Image (cartoon, rainbow, N blue to C red):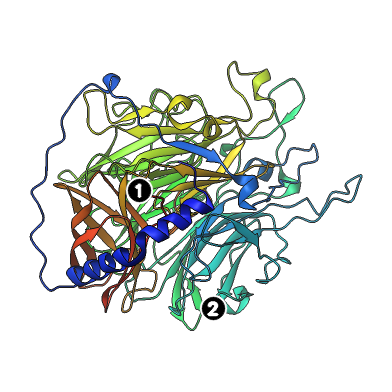
Amino acid sequence: MRKTILGIAAAFVLVGASGLLVLYLVLSRANRGEAPPPPEQKAYGVTSLTRIQPPRVTFTDVTAESGVDFVHVHGGYGRKLLPETMGSGVLVFDFDQDGHQDLLFVNSTRWPHHRYDTPPPRTRMALYRNDGTGRFTDVTAALGLADVDCYGMGAAAGDIDNDGYPDLLVTALNRCYLFHNQKGERFVDITEQAGLICPGWSTSAAFLDYDLDGKLDIFICHYVRWTPETDLHCTLIGSEKSYCQPFLYEGEHCQLFRNLGDNRFADVSKEAGLHIYDVLGKKPASKALGVAVHDYNDDGWPDIAVANDTTPNFLFHNNGDGTFTNVGGRKGVELINEGRGSARGAMGIFWGYYRDGETLGLAIANFSNEPNGLLKYVKRRDIFIDVANAEGVGGPSRLPLKFGLFFFDYDLDGRLDLFTSNGHIEPEISRVQAGATYAQPPQLFWNAGPTDEGCYREVEPAHAGPDLFKPRVGRGAAFGDLDGDGDQDIVLNNNNEPATILRNDCPPTTQAIRIRLRGVECNRDAYGARVRVWAGGEMQQAEVTSGGSYLSQCEAILTFGLGSHKQAERVEVVWPTRDRRSATFSQLQAGFTYLIDEKDGLVEAVPFRRPAP
C-alpha cells in the first residue's frame, strides 16, 4: 500500500457526507446510556506455529522523504569513553495538540574536554513538527530547544500542570532538564525553579501519578558513577582499549520526584523506598537503563519495573501510601542467567497483554548472548515466569545485543507483536566473537496466538520487506501513527548514525480503532488509565503509560487492531482515580481515532487517513 497524497485525498472524499453520518451514529451510540454486557470470549485454537505464515506487512524506510535529517553524534575521538556506547532516545508525542504525532530526537555531544583537530559542528537535540501526513519540519530553534547543550540520554513527556499541553523531560550526563510547554508555541526551561535536581548519570524516565492526586510525578533512572577521569581501561584485543561493561562501576540510585503543584517537585526517592543496596548493604544496586510503569496486580496503584544492566531488575510495588517495596526477587523479575548466577545486562523494557486479553507480559531486552526476557504474570500465584523460550522469543534473540524494545500490533490482528532495536557496543566485536557485528538488524516477532510452539515467530524480510532489517547500531526505539492511517510506524535513534523512520504499510483491509484519553479529575494525560476493547468475541486491554522501551517513549494513543471486524462492540475505560471510576461505550466503528473525556465521554471521532481498500 503506497501512501500518497492522492490516496489521502481520496480517503477524505470517501468519508464525505456518508462519513459525517457514520461519525454522528458512532458518537450518539457510544454515549447512549447503558452498554450491552461484554460478548462471550472465544477460545483460541492451538495449532502448530510452523504451519502459520506471518502476513505480508511491509515496513518502508521513508526517512529522507519525511524531512527528518537528524544524525546522532556520540562524540567519540578514540579514547572509548563509556557513554559513547549508550546512544540516545526518541520521543513520539503531540506537543502542539493538533492531533498529529511529533518527534523529538535526543542527542549526545562532543566531549568538551577534548580538542578536536577540526572544530566540529555543534550538536543538538531535534524537535520535528508533523503536518499530519508523516512529513516533518524541524522546529527546534523556533520552540526554544536549540541552545540546550548536554550529553543527552532519554526523554519523556507529561502534562505536569494539566493545562492540556505535554511538558518535556530530558535526561543527560550530570543533570536533567524539565521544559514547560507554552501551549505548543515554545518550551521554557523550568528545571531549577521546579527543584528537579538530578546529578549523576540519568537515563530513562517516566511520568506517573504514583499517589493518585491528579498530578504527574516523575521517575528517573540512574546508571553508574562515571566521569572522564574515572573511565576504566578494558581490552578485547591485546592492549587496545575497548569499552568496559557496567559491572565494573558502582551504580547510582533511581529518583522519584513528587509533584507539589505550581510546577514544583520534591525528591522523595529515599522515603519512598527507592534506595536499593547491594547484598552488603553499602553500594547502590541500581544500574538502571529502562523503566516501564503498569499496575501489574490490578490493585489500582501504578507499579514500576526497572531494567538494570548487570544487576538484578527491580519491580517496585506501589503500597498505596506513598511508598514502594522492591519485590523483584520474590516475584521473579530479577532475571538471573542460568548456570552463571549473574544478572543479565538489561536495557529496554515494556509491558503488554501479549497472549490474550488477560495474559500480562513484561518484555526485557538484554545483552548479547543473553536472550530477551518475556516474563508472564501468573495472577493466581502473584509471580512472574520467564517464558521467552516457550513462546519462541528466547532462541532467536540470544546472539544480538538488544536495546529499544516494545510490544505493538503491527498487523492489526488484535495480538501484540514484539520489536527490538539491536546493535553492539564495541565496533571491533567481529574481531573477537565469531558471527557478531557492530551494526545489527532489528528483530520483529509476529504473534500467531497460542500454539503448541509458543506465540511468537521471528519475521523475515520476505514478510516485512528489507528496509526494516537493515543493520544499524540500534538504540532508542518507539512507535506511533505518524501518517494518520491507523497503523503504527517505527522510529529509531541509532548510535552515531542517522535516525530511521519506517512506515508501516499495513493493508487497508485491516481494521482498527485508536483511543485517546483526556483526564479531568485524574491527570490530563490519563497515564494509568486502563482500556478494554471487545470485538468479535475477543477482548484486548492496554494501559496508557509514559516511558518504556529504552531512553524513549511511544505515542500515548492506544491502538487496538480488530482484524476483519468492522466495529468494537464494547469499550471500557477505567480512569486512574482512587475510586477507579469507569465509563463504557458501545458499537465504536473501525477506522476512527476516538477522543474520550473523563467528564464528557466520547467527544470526537477522527477518521483514519486511508485510501479505499
Going by the picture, which residue comes out furthest to the top? 434
At x 25% / y 39%, what residue is drawn?
Answer: 355
User: Which quadrant of the figure has residue 175?
Assistant: bottom right
Residue 575 appears anywhere in the view: no
Residue 187 appears anywhere in the view: yes
Query: What amino acid does circle 2 point to?
Result: Lys
Q: Nearer the viewer, residue 400 or 22?
A: 22
Q: Nearer the viewer, residue 50 or 400?
A: 50
Q: Which residue is mark 1?
A: 351
Label 1 crowding class (10 Å Cα cut-off): few <14, some 14-19, many 20+? many
At x 71% / y 68%, what residue is drawn?
Answer: 141
Q: Nearer the viewer, residue 607 or 149?
A: 607
Question: From the image, which quarter does the C terminus lie in?
Answer: top left
Question: Label for residue 309?
Answer: none
Query: What amino acid does circle 1 point to?
Result: Trp
> Is residue 238 toward the left or the right of residue 190 in the image?
right
